[in-house]
Image (cartoon, grey):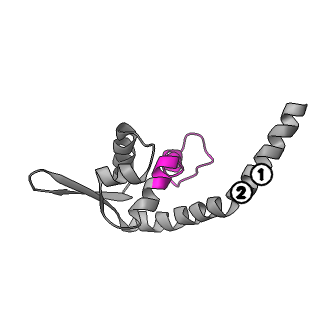
Amino acid sequence: MKANPFNLSCPSRDILDLIGSKWAMLLLCVLRQGPIRTGELRRKVNGISQKMLTQTLRDLERNGIVQRISYAEVPPRVEYKLTRRGHSLSELIVQIEHWVTNHYERIKETQRTFDSVERAS
């Protein structure tokens, strides 16, 4: 079956939901810097809960976007890194990150203008 995200019943929509989520995007940006431990990921992605971090990392791992590396040490150590597929996706995500930062001020200005017009009507 060929992917068609415009088709409601196509499973490719699940992939689109995952990679389009704010947490996945932020994690991919951080993971571009190299392998990182879970606690450090959580500190760098301010506001993500432990539950959401774990769930998003598992979903990314299930889809071959990140790799979980477990070290047989005491205490146990786990790191995550991007796979080749994850690196190709992160290139796109970084472009979105740059777009957001480059357009942020104008967007906020447009929102304020829109909101003031909406309140006036």
Q: Position of residue 41 (x, y in %)?
A: 36, 53
Verify whether residue 4 appears in magenta: yes
Q: Which residue is rendered at x = 34% and y = 67% of the image?
A: 34
Circle 2: residue type: Glu
Depth check: 28 or 65 in front?
28
Q: Which residue is mark 2?
A: 105
Depth check: 7 or 91 in front?
91
Depth check: 56 or 108 in front?
108
| Position of the C terminus by quadrant | top right
Q: Which residue is mark 1?
A: 109
Assign a secondary structure to mark 2: helix
Where does the magenta region start and end?
A: 1-26
The residue lying furthest to the right in this view is: 121
Circle 1: residue type: Glu
Q: Position of residue 19 (x, y in %)?
A: 50, 52
Depth check: 6 or 38 in front?
38
Q: Which residue is rendered at x = 14% and y = 51% of the image?
A: 76
Is 49 positioned to the left or the right of 37 in the image?
A: right
When asked about the image quadrant of residue 82, the answer is bottom left
Assign a secondary structure to mark 1: helix
Q: Position of residue 100 (x, y in %)?
A: 63, 58
Give the spatial CA distance, label 1 vs label 2. Answer: 6 Å
